Image (cartoon, rainbow, N blue to C red):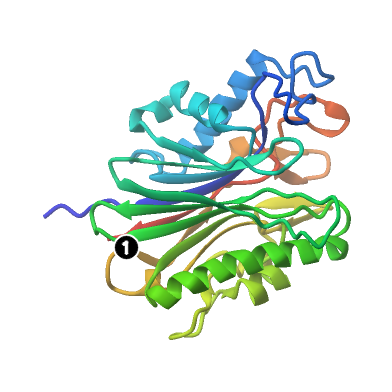
Amino acid sequence: MIAQPPITVMFYNVENFFDTVDDPKTQDEEYLPTSELQWDDKKYNSKIQHIAQVVDSSVAGIGLPDVVGFCEIENKKVLTDLINNSQLKIKKYAVLTSTGLDDRGINVGLIYNPLVFDFVESKELNVTNTDIANYKTRNVLFVTLKCKSTNELIYFFVNHWPSRRDGEKETEPRRIYAAKIVRQKIDDLQKLNANVKAIVMGDLNDYPTNASVLTTLKANANPKKASNELLNPFFNMEKNKDGTHYDKGEWHVFDHIIMSQAFMQAKGLQFKPNTAFVLKKDFVLFKNFKTGEVKPNRTYGYGNKYYNGYSDHLAVYIQLSF
């Protein structure tokens, strides 16, 4: 009997993946052909090819990932264009996106292989704290899929938590609130089924040791058995001065794939040790040969200089075995 290849689940903050069309309902003027950035079809198509290259590289040689979560996308159109105008069209991915509350129209999305998963349900979780005046943030995309091979339900949470733009400590309550909403949903699922299989992926704008992730979401490297704690396989990465995002001369983990402990059990899809990865290949990195500094290769740099890069974040992915 031929063993089935593992299922690959990926997440990627694609950094301002906008189309070139003005949406009068959002503040997307920065990414238009007439803007200072001159965001035209040539740059848009290059962005598509770069994102597709990253997605393809996660399982190079054996196919494409089965589920990919994205953040910093404008709408469903950009993901549909990504699939239709690259090698990703081979898998005929289904596309789901959030509608969101972000002023710029920034959303999250998920694509999945319909030959591997059946669609069950998609909802949005509002994580905007209404106690903060004039504040809006992106919704969490909550998707339920059924694995065709094992007939089990997998619950996906695609996140892009509030940024640190106004200060880390000043904005921390917003991320804790987002974590609280996600944690409550997982608790509700676990009350119905203690062995529920949930995956929380996203740019959380917090490190594994920050309160939102470690305390509120209850995610760590060694969750206590028979508890509701979650497994974060990227938890110890920063100890090796590694990460997914580079800021002020240091690497940090902002991008996570976190899962419930049911994936550590012998039944159905399993997560095995050392099968969580950061895609840190040369083509997604910028190397400063004068200073030796290495960081993500961005689309635009300081002063709106166009680098024709990939993103200011690195993609993360895990493998689930049968």
Compared across the picture, whether 196 is left or right of 284 comes to: left
- Residue 232 in sight from this viewpoint: no
Q: Residues within 10 Å of mark 1 (few under 14, many from 20)?
A: many
Please identify the quadrant where the C terminus is shown: bottom left
Which residue is at a point 54% across and 48% down the rendered structure image?
11
Please identify the quadrant where the N terminus is shown: bottom left
Which residue is at a point 42% across and 30% down the rendered structure image?
88
Asked if residue 26 is positioned above or below residue 143 in the image, the reply reads above
Asked if residue 45 is positioned above or below residue 127 in the image, the reply reads above
Question: Label 1 amino acid?
Answer: Leu
Please provide percent x and percent y for residue 124.
56, 51
- Residue 151 in sight from this viewpoint: yes
Residue situated in front as seen by the camera: 294 or 277: 277
* Image-quadrant location for residue 102: top right
Please provide percent x and percent y for residue 198.
45, 64
Q: Secondary structure at mark 1?
A: loop
Compared across the picture, whether 114 is left or right of 217 comes to: left
* Image-quadrant location for residue 213: bottom right
Please provide percent x and percent y for residue 62.
33, 41
Count of marks overlaid on the render: 1
Compared across the picture, whether 152 is left or right of 124 comes to: left
Compared across the picture, whether 250 is left or right of 261 comes to: right
Which residue is at a point 32% across and 54% down the rendered structure image?
146
Asked if residue 29 is positioned above or below residue 65 in the image, the reply reads above
Which residue is at a point 50% across and 85% down the rendered structure image?
224
Residue situated in front as seen by the camera: 305 or 257: 257
Please provide percent x and percent y for residue 41.
64, 14
In the rendered image, which residue does mark 1 sit on? Answer: 269
Residue situated in front as seen by the camera: 90 or 104: 104
